[in-house]
Image (cartoon, grey):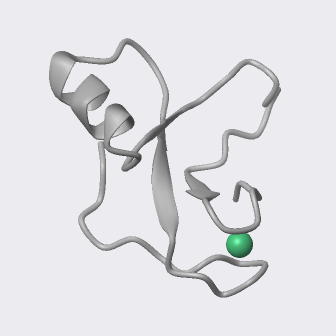
Amino acid sequence: MIEKENPVCNYCSSKKVIPIFYGYPTSKDYQDYEKGNLKFGESIFLGAKPKWYCKKCGESF
Ligand SMILES: [Zn+2]
């Protein structure tokens, strides 16, 4: 589930924060991904799954 209001980055306070999507993406998820509004979660995140990705500093939280 994707929330409408994106938070600011925990690390740099940027508002360029996009949701991280886990699971099987729909075509709409792909559209958001291609627009840069969504990031697909990867298996490098073992255990904790961050919900948000900062496009400015590259941190996930
Ligand atoms: Zn940041």
Position of 11 with respect to 32 (left or right) is: right
Query: Which quadrant, please, contains the N terminus?
Result: top left
- The residue positioned farthest toward the bottom in the image shown: 13
Q: Position of residue 39 (x, y in %)?
A: 50, 38
Furthest residue toward left: 28
Residue at 74% over, 18% down: 43
Q: Residue furthest front?
A: 35
Tell me residue 61's x, y (percent): 70, 59
Q: What's the residue at 78%, 31% (across, down)? A: 45
Q: Dividing the picture into quarters, in which one does residue 53 lie?
A: bottom right
Residue 17: x percent and y percent? 52, 66
The residue depicted at 66 percent of the width and 48 percent of the height is 50
Q: Is residue 41 left or right of residue 10?
A: left
Ligand 1 is located in which of the four quadrants?
A: bottom right
Picture quadrant of residue 48: top right
The quadrant holding residue 4 is bottom left
**Residue 30, image x, y percentages:** 29, 24
